[in-house]
Image (tube, helix red, strand yellow):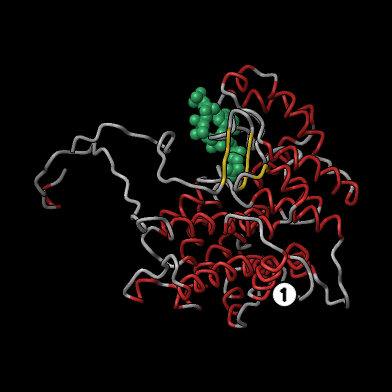
Amino acid sequence: KGLRVQDKGFLNTAVMQSRITYIDGDAGILRYRGYPIEQLAEQSSHLESAYLLIYGALPTRDQFKHFESEVLRHGVMHADAQEFFRSFRQAYDAHPMSMLTSAFAMLGSYYSEANPSLQGQRLYTRGDKTSLETMDRQIYRLIGKATTLAAMAYRVRQGREFVTPPTGLSYAASFLYQMDHLSEENYVPNPVLEKALDVLFLIHADHELNASCTTVLQTGSSLVDPYSAVAAGCASLYGPLHGGANEAVIRMLISIGKPENVPAFIEAVKRREKTLSGFGHRVYKTSDPRSFIVRKTAAEVFRVTGKDELLETAMALHDAAMKDEYFIKRRLAPNVDFWYADGLIYRAMGFPLDFFPVLFVVPRVVGWLAHWRQMMLQEGGVKIWRPRQIYIGEGVRGYIPIDERN
Ligand code: CMC
């Protein structure tokens, strides 16, 4: 009663205080725990930045060694999971995101300690060593197994055997190994591609309260286990307005084909018959700072793989949109998913199109867990997220038996 303000799409609703990621969308600034994304992309690694995002400070050498070895050690998946993956309907070309979403939820059934409600109490408590160790273990498991489950979703569609995570490789290299290892001895992924993937992972690791992170927190606010909360986040990220955009961009570029078809496509967007995927952002109204890092990474990858044939079409589309009044007026700029976009890099590296959102989920698990941990340990405990609505339906009505309705 008395609610008057509707904030459709949460344009102006802050649901929590956070110390994790700072974004200034007008100035094009992104910082993890105060460190500019450009510095981290240049000097850090995905797992080091993951530690920073989750625990709030850059790790010492010993802390990093421990974190890295725990994450990689927890990459190993129980053999039963192989049956789980084989049960998907490969004949219908099961989408890897459907498999991955289900697989995260499945993890909860492997680790029943996960569900706080089973304990009859709140599981995580500041200063309580045992509960914090449980939380850490869940974090290691989810980050470690993200690459393993993703690789399983990839290989099962090809009818290939699953690969146990190797030892002695970096997080990105271990992932490439599990994806494409063809059983040769001493397989070492191309170092340029390994580095590129690590940088892409790092810049996708967090982006504060985007749709999927919000979903993880909303779900987690009921005190459900983190595996279920991450599965919910994965489902949210699958949508084409969010993580599905990198796949949508490439499909759009393929449908446009040659640069000369760009003007007709732009006109169709303006008539609202098409969406220019990879343009626009809720927060960035100028350039997305990550797009510059992606551009640099793309140049390095293309030196190894050769240029993608869609690059020219992408550039023509970019240039046409940037000088068109429709896009200027609405402050629509290319986001991280556009041209020198991660999508073109992933394509050049040989990943299938529908696998692109998976390559977004794998690193984003880190951000989801950083926010989830912050929420679980916040001063005063967790408050369940329960928004209000403004009811605009019928007033009270009397039930009419089915034979008397017309
Ligand atoms: N193409 C054409 N028109 C657009 C686009 C676009 N890509 N994006 C926004 N608009 C128009 C929209 O129709 C609206 O026009 P009007 O005011 O005349 O009705 C105006 O611009 C404002 O857009 P909005 O939809 O109110 O903005 P939003 O903040 O609610 O949505 C967005 C943000 C990212 C969902 C949207 O820009 C979009 O759909 N972009 C394409 C999908 C995409 O690239 N998503 C990836 C986002 S970045 C990575 C990630 O988060 O996963």
Percent of width and height locating residue 32? 62, 47
Q: Is residue 274 visible?
A: no
What residue would you read off at disc 1?
A: 165
Residue drawn 90% across the image and 47% down it: 303
Above or below residue 336? Residue 229 is: below
Above or below residue 85? Residue 42 is: above
Occupied quadrant, residue 268: top right
Q: Residue furthest top?
A: 325
Above or below residue 272? Residue 251 is: below
Q: Is residue 50 visible?
A: yes
Quick one: quadrant of the C terminus?
top left
In the image, taking residue 107 as reference, residue 293 lies left or right, namely right
Above or below residue 206? Residue 331 is: above
Residue drawn 73% across the image and 44% down it: 39
Occupied quadrant, residue 351: bottom right
SS category of the residue bearing label 1: loop
Residue drawn 79% across the image and 73% down it: 168
Q: Nearer the viewer, residue 275 or 192?
A: 192
Mark 1 within 8 Å of ligand 1, using the beta carbon: no
Percent of width and height locating residue 301? 84, 49
Q: Nearer the viewer, residue 299 or 268?
A: 299
- How many residues crowd mark 1 within 10 Å: few (<14), some (14–19), many (20+)? many
In the image, taking residue 288 as reference, residue 340 lies left or right, namely right
Percent of width and height locating residue 135? 50, 69
- Count numbered badges in the picture: 1
Residue drawn 48% across the image and 58% down it: 372
Quick one: quadrant of the N terminus?
top left
Label 1 amino acid?
Pro
Percent of width and height locating residue 158? 72, 68
In the image, taking residue 405 as reference, residue 186 lies left or right, namely right
Q: Nearer the viewer, residue 213 or 374?
A: 374
